């Protein structure tokens, strides 16, 4: 689901990231320290997704960042082309790169923007971002400002000094261990035991395998389902592929149900009574969106290709209601081991909703000092139909 964000919200992206530390998922959401950047002189901490959102505000941005004691340089530039990759796809690509030994990576992502003071103005831009380690062919080809070059040299000097201190401590410990043969024997057998546990874990299939997105049957598989049962694919429609999909797949005789809050087509048999109850609420409160459902505009190339029609009247309450419903779907899927759409069990989607709900639940200031975050102000929803199968 994509909602434009007001200007007042974008100034607090990094500060809110600190507040949301508890909702981070260990080993999946890297904390980024912004050491130097072309947008401001401040040192900030945030998550990768927050960083890409902020970087998209400028046509060109350059940031020197640190992730897990490794230094990187991040370039982001707005491009005229349109990308089908979401910001979540870009985050997944950068996550995989950080864990790898490669020197640099580039990817595209599409983001809905609202950088003016008008709540009515909505735009969608595509950005290309390149993340490079502070060494390697790509980095060495750059000509950085003197201040940034000196900063990186200082950081690398501290890093080398830390490694040398650890090495000296290890040598000292090893020398002492040789003097105490009992310690050596204990360490040796501890290492053997750890190796046996490691081998047993692999043989039993308990060793964690990192999920990598991939193409299958012409569809990009974005989400890690693990052992959850349910639809494997989630295809997003555009004005290029909606009609061709509709021509190949029956959809006029009740084969599919539609969820308004996340614009998702789901197999009709997976629409249970609880989901129907919530969908009737969305249908009644948001008649414009319900009319799109009734007309099946959401699967028409001509409608999806009209930049004015896909900007549908909405409000902040719609986003909050969607997030509450999304969290309930996630909970149900985790409790039962069965999901409806792959994104229903995506941890990044859940983190986004938790962060948004924190922002609503914990506003700045004393009680009654500011207007509640959730109000009836007019917004525009950028409609994005997807089908789960």
Image: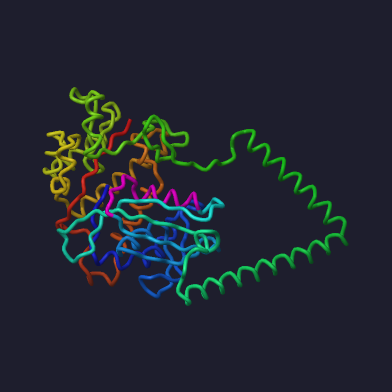
Q: Count the marks.
A: 0
Q: Residue at x 13, y 48 (%)?
A: 308
Viewer-proximal residue among 381 and 196: 381
Give the image location of residue 190, x and y in percent. Answer: 76, 49
Residue 86 located within the stretch drawn in magenta:
yes
Range of residues picked out in magenta: 80-97
Give the image location of residue 123, x and y in percent. Answer: 21, 55
Give the image location of residue 45, x and y in percent. Answer: 43, 66
Q: Residue at x 20, y 34 (%)?
A: 299
Q: Is residue 101 above or below residue 195?
A: below
Q: Main secondary structure of the magenta part?
A: helix
Give the image location of residue 36, x and y in percent. Answer: 44, 71
Viewer-proximal residue among 189 and 293: 293
User: Is 351 left, or right, of 294 in this rendering?
Assistant: right
User: Is 136 left, or right, of 191 in this rendering?
Assistant: left
Tell me the quadrant of the picture where the C terminus can be found.
top left
User: Is 112 left, or right, of 89 in this rendering?
Assistant: left
Viewer-proximal residue among 275 and 50: 50
Q: Is residue 249 above or below residue 174?
A: above
Q: Residue at x 48, y 59 (%)?
A: 132
Residue 20 located within the stretch drawn in magenta:
no
Q: Residue at x 45, y 74 (%)?
A: 145
Based on the displayed image, in which of its 4 quarters is residue 205 positioned?
Answer: top right
């Amino acid at each position: 689901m994509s909602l434009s964000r007001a200007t007042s919200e974008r100034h607090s992206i990094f500060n809110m990231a600190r507040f949301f530390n508890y909702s981070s998922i260990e080993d999946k959401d890297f904390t980024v320290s912004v050491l130097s950047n072309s947008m401001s002189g401040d040192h900030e901490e945030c998550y990768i997704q927050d960083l890409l959102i902020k970087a998209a505000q400028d046509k060109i941005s350059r940031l020197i960042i640190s992730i897990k004691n490794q230094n990187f340089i991040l370039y982001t530039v707005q491009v005229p082309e349109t990308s089908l990759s979401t910001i979540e796809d870009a985050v997944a690509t950068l996550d995989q790169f950080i864990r790898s030994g490669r020197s640099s990576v580039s990817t595209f992502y599409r983001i809905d923007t609202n950088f003016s003071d008008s709540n009515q103005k909505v735009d969608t831009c595509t950005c290309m971002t390149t993340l490079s380690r502070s060494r390697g062919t790509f980095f060495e080809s750059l000509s950085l400002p003197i201040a940034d070059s000196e900063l990186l040299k200082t950081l690398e000097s501290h890093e080398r000094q830390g490694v040398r201190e650890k090495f000296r401590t290890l040598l000292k410990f090893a020398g002492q261990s040789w003097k105490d043969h009992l310690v050596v024997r204990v360490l040796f057998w501890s290492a053997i035991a750890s190796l046996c546990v490691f081998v047993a874990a692999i043989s039993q299939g308990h060793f964690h395998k990192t999920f990598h997105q991939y193409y299958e049957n012409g569809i990009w598989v974005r989400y890690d389902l693990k052992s959850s049962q349910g639809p494997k694919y989630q295809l997003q429609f555009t004005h290029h592929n909606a009609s061709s999909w509709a021509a190949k797949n029956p959809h006029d005789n009740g084969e599919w149900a539609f969820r308004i809050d996340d614009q998702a087509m789901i197999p009709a048999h997976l629409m249970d009574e609880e989901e129907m109850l919530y969908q009737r609420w969305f249908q009644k409160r948001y008649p414009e969106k319900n009319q799109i459902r009734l007309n099946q505009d959401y699967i028409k190339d001509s409608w999806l290709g009209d930049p004015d029609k896909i900007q549908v009247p909405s409000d902040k309450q719609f986003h909050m209601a969607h997030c509450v419903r999304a969290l309930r779907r996630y909970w149900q899927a985790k409790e039962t081991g069965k999901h409806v759409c792959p994104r229903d069990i995506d941890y990044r989607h859940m983190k986004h909703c938790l962060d948004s709900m924190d922002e609503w639940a914990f506003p700045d200031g004393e009680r009654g000092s500011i207007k509640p975050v959730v109000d009836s102000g007019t917004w525009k929803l950028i409609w994005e139909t997807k089908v789960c199968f």
